[in-house]
Amino acid sequence: MKDGSSIPAKFSNLSQHSYYGITGRIRDENNLPVEGCIVQAFDKDLGIFLNPDDPLGKAITDEEGAFEIIFDKADFEDWFEGSPDVYLKVWDQDGKILVITDEKENNTHKMDFQIKLGKGTTNPIEPDLYASNLSRMILAFNATFNIESLSNSDIRTVAEVLFRAVNSWVIYRDELASYAGYDGIQVPSHPRRVEHYHVTRWDKPVLPIEE
Amino acid sequence: MNAIYGLDRLRSRKEHYLTVEGDVLEHCDICVIGSGAAGAVLAKKLCDFSKSVVLLERGGYFEGEDMNQRDEDMIPLLWKNCAANFTSDLRIAISQGSCLGGSTVINDAVCFPLPDIVRRQWRDLGVKISDEEWTRATSEVSDSIHIAAVREDELSSNSLMFRKGCELMGYSKHHPNSRNCFNCMQCGLCHLGCHYETKQDMRVTYIHKALNNPTSIIKIYCNCKAERITYSGDIISEVEGSFVDSSGNIRYKMRVNAQLVIVAAGSIASTELLLKSSIANGKAGKGLALHPVPFVLGDFPFEIKGIQGIPMAYALHDFGVTNGVENGGFLVEGIFLPPLQLSLLLPVSGGHHEELMLRYNHYAMAGVLVRDGSNGEISLNDLGLPRVDYSLKQKELESIARGVEVISRIWFKLGASRIVTPHMARPILENPDEIPELISAIKNDPRGMLLGSAHPQGGNRMGNDPKTCVVDSNCRVYGFRNLFVCDASVFPTALGSIRS
């Protein structure tokens, strides 16, 4: 299983079995595919010496930079966890580490990693471009509604709908992110201040439609 | 020295960047106003011909590392007027970019070739551009921005749902889109700028090339709003503008003396500039088309996570100009939106709005891209700000109704427990039998709909009649020797499909 030798027929059957599937592609700083990278998946475990992270499978990227790793429940299961906390390590052909992704628990049995090599340059004295953005946005919306004739109840209705949408975002966005499970943000809030890898990771739901 | 100039004290940028510290007076061969799809290509090509170019851009200079994937941070930085860009009755939200690279920085990067029907119709309206010229220009741009079809393994869950629906309903012409994206990272957040610089927008392609060609002479001024074009007789003498900071304060003044001026600020802004300069009065602003888009969501009992992957990757062409429909017609596009934008098009408010937002991961979504008539007009209001008046006519309502029905039936067929519609009076459908009520609401109460628009076109019509058209087939403004308008505002009719 670790070398992907007995691959099940379709990823869509994964959750019915105990298999997990990881796909991905690696491109370089010029967006060109990188062949020959070594990719290994791990399950993060608590502790370091007594409970090292479980290796889940290894692959080498092909000429399109693509790789595929399949692993089984048995590869990570222990007393504490029923689902794996998956992260990837990527090395070049000389063994130099290129990327270590963040770990994240997976229970969809299906993950995709899009990786772009290289990290952005960081500079702690960059101006904060995002300061007051939300208030600018609310002011811009408010100004739009004031300019038009709000004595027209027709327009006022729509203005209220839109303004409440923006307002509700302000109030609810953190709740929405956690309750609604929005996982779209994958870079730091100030990318120029925090060194980070360029990884898009999707834990993909299996759709109950034939693929 | 070639450089980008702006008001912010930026430090680690890939391009040569300098901060503006006082009023600016420039002399150049050509002043290009607007750095979007048209302005950037023009500026670069003019540099190739050894012209000195000054490029003015109202918005700011942002690179991949500035795109932090958060709606509330990126929309105010990249979108025109923080996305508060509406028609006068607030029914249509018009998406446009205002930053270096223009709308190409915030679009979904979808590219279609100009449909043959549209070429022919434009020719009949007096646009004298030959097929060879179209083909040559199109293939040159396509190569520069790396247009390629979306691959099978790149189709997101939302796209797969839409494709499956098209198959089940028996439609014949549907396929993945082509995009100007090079090995896309599939983060799903194209509208918030591409953090990874895989999207081949104008900044990373034409603008980058123009700045780094050693024989170019180009200065790009960001945060610089062009306010007036001054002229004497039929010769343009100057472009006047202001450097405006993020709080809206005017910090410095700008004046450009140019031999030739090209206005490429996009529909609405190009017209605004002409009207403010008293150019093409009575003609500029007429004949705006918007490609209005109603969105329809299917709420499913299982998770789809539509945001995971390329937002606009698959389209249904059966009903559109790309399938031979001569008059009007529409495309149906699978599309997904980041949360704040999605929240703006839900036709409900209050607690109902919150309840619908919490279903975010359970939605599949598609939109109807309507090829509308030139039903809109741009004018200046009392405060001197642009005002867009637009009304949907019978033809558009038919297309909207038909397209909304197509999508609704697709989602119900796939097992949606309910549909979220674009209509405020009929926001939720619980079963397919309710679709006729929605159609009736659309046709009888069109002002109850909330629509989007990503393709404002027209307003400064191209053609061979100086009495009704603003520019000729060379984009030269009638009545002037050295003034051109070259952007989507010159389109004589709506395209009906998408060109990045």
Image (spheres, coloured by chain):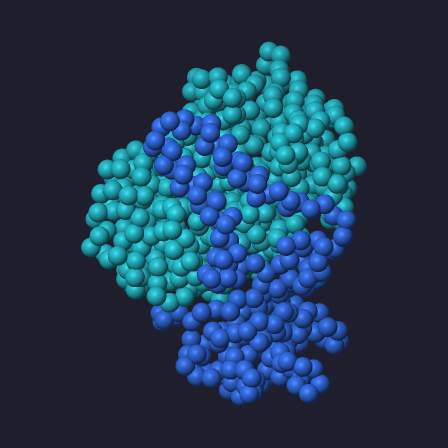
Chain colours: A blue, B cyan
Which is more toward the observer, A207 or A166? A166
Number of numbered discs on residues: 0
Q: Residue B433, percent across and down?
A: 20, 55
Residue sitting at x 52%, y 22%: B384
The C terminus of chain A sits in image quarter: bottom left
The N terminus of chain A lies in quadrant: bottom right
Q: Residue furthest right?
A: B1
Residue at 27% from the left image edge and 53% from the top image edge: B429
- Give coordinates of residue B160: x percent, y percent: 40, 63
User: Residue B359: where, in percent of width, then height?
Assistant: 40, 59
* In front of the other: B45 or B54: B54
Quadrant of res B442 = top left
Can you give x and y, in whole percent of width and height, for residue B263 in the image?
58, 28
The residue sitting at 24% across, 57% down in the picture is B431
Compared with A74, B314 (above or below) is: above
Left or right: A117 as drawn, with respect to A182: right
What residue sits 61% from the left and 53% below the top? Answer: B68
| Left or right: where B119 falls relative to A87 | left
Q: In this rendering, does residue A151 appear at all?
A: yes
